Amino acid sequence: MKIMIAYPAIKGKGSPMLTQNRQFQWMSLGSYIFPLVMASAATLLHRQGHDVIWYDGIAEHLSQDHFFHKIANEKPELIVLETKTPVVKLHWALIDRIKLLNPEIRVVLVGDHVTALPAESLHKSRVDFVLTGGDYDFSLKGLVDALRGKSSLPSGVYYRENGNIKNTGKFSLKADLNALPFIDRELTKAHLYFEKWKKREPFRYTMAGRDCQWGRCTFCSWTNLYPSFRVRRVESLLDEIEMLVGEYGVKEIFDDTGNFPAGEWLKKFCNGLIERGLDKEILFSCNMRFDFLANRPELTDLMKRAGFRKMKSGLESANQKTLDRINKNVRVEQIVEGCRLASEAGLDIQLTVMVGYPWETRDDARRTLDLARSLMARGYAEMLQATVVVPYPGTALFRDAVKNRWIRFEPVDSWERYDMTEPALKTVDMGPEEVMRLCSRIYKSFITPRFVMRQVLGIRTMEDLKYVMRGSRAVIGHILDFARIRS
Ligand code: SF4
């Protein structure tokens, strides 16, 4: 079967940050994160003998007209699109245009929005199948097998039959991640994707697990895709890294598991990197909760020796009542301690914070700003990322927001307004403009003379210089993203 896995250009308020992302944002400066699970789907289908086209019009800066020409030329039988709440209406329009062009093409939607509201897209567009759950690779293979008459539909599929919407029940996440082939980096054009903070090239992504051991934060849209956690064997990830280094000369890796495995798994992984000599070949970064590191100095030292460079972690708020309400299951002191240990071991820490919680006052939000500033000033964190809280459908926060009338607009028909160009939630004593300004101020807050001096003194090589320049452009882009409400 000829299958196109596509991220077509969509017109909006900037470059859509759609792939592999737990939040959506229109960016002033495009950000192209490797969609690991879709890439795994492309690889699996290709291995099954299907003709797979990987098409990313966003990362390749191709127009929507180019996408439709491509469809007309290639004539795929199946097109798969990943969507998120703020752009789901744009995808419905796109699907209807595909069907107008060729009604024979079958279109599939995946993603956290359609997992939360699977029937909606079948009502609102001519999409043929909605696959729920986050195992796009296994579920797409199951769907394709069923379309070829080799099996029945897998669980978690929504479809139409005689004008009625049917489904095959709750999706399953029982498949073994170790059974998947390594992602085909050429088929999926892995060179297009990178983090703005990369230091070395070639830069590539891996994914050790799906998706987070905790998986219960009330705002996190991916808890809905992966309600349970699975992790690959340590050897499987080490083998993949060895392959990336050996075959592609990769020098830096970011593992985009929602929360990198900790404990004995992490120890074994670090020792494996050292034993295989990979600590000398690559810089390795990941997402990690700092409570996993608090009181474990031996772990942060081992990570540094194994080639770890950076860890991204959610501080979210400096107010314990907020951390408790969003079910983060962490104490402010643990975050500070985790940051201290990691930074003292020589690891770079990137913190993410959020503003615009419906129960937080201006003073609460300022407390977060102050803590973030002080962590930066003490050198416990290297970078800060600020976003506005968005209650995505399928999350506990969305349910609470609807129940308590926290959403600033009509909750269900205004999906395009969950795009972070304005706050979606009312706050106690701040207007929407003030929330956006605060977000922008958090970005500006770490650009102190001391911070600038540290960056300048840290420049030793051309790579360092490029990193500082790329980082500066990214920060300016983020400041612009939140400078005002965009329409
Ligand atoms: S710790 Fe991070 S990845 Fe895990 S549920 Fe919370 S926000 Fe999501």
Image (cartoon, rainbow, N blue to C red):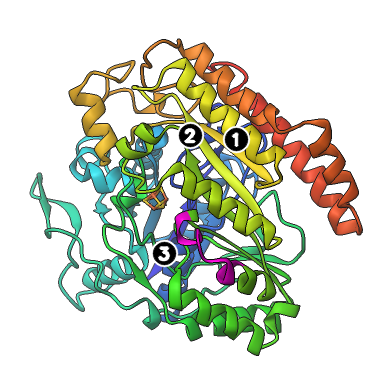
Q: Which residue is mark 1?
A: 372
Q: Which mark is residue 318?
A: 2
The residue carrying mark 3 is 3
x 28%, y 19%: residue: 406
As drawn, the label of residue 44 is: none
What secondary structure is the stretch in magenta mostly built from?
helix
Q: Does the CB distance between marks 1 and 2 fall below 8 Å?
A: yes
Separation of marks 2 and 3 at Cα, in angstroms: 47 Å
Question: Quarter of the image containing the N terminus?
Answer: bottom left
Instruction: Residue 483: give x, y in percent of width and height.
Output: 62, 19
Badge 2, how many Cα within 10 Å: few under 14, some, many 20+? many
Q: Is residue 18 visible?
A: no
Q: Residue at x 23, y 18 (%)?
A: 405
Using the rendered image of the protein, determine whether residue 393 is visible from the camera's viewpoint. yes
Report whether 424 appears left or right of 453: left
Q: CA distance from mark 3 to mark 1?
A: 46 Å
Tell me if residue 99 is in the magenta stretch: no
Distance from Cα at disc 1 to Cα at disc 2: 8 Å
Query: In this orientation, which residue lies closer to the viewer: 70 or 131?
Result: 131
Residue 337: % across, % down: 54, 51
- Indicate the amino acid at tag 2: Ala
Give the percent coordinates (x, y) of residue 27: 60, 34
| Whether label 3 touches label 1, CB < 8 Å | no
Q: Residue at x 66, y 76 (%)?
A: 306
Q: Secondary structure at mark 3?
A: strand
Marked residue nearer the N-terminal end (2 or 3): 3
Residue 42 location (% of width, % of height): 45, 68
- In primary-sequence order, the first of circles 1 and 2 is 2
Q: Residue at x 66, y 84 (%)?
A: 274
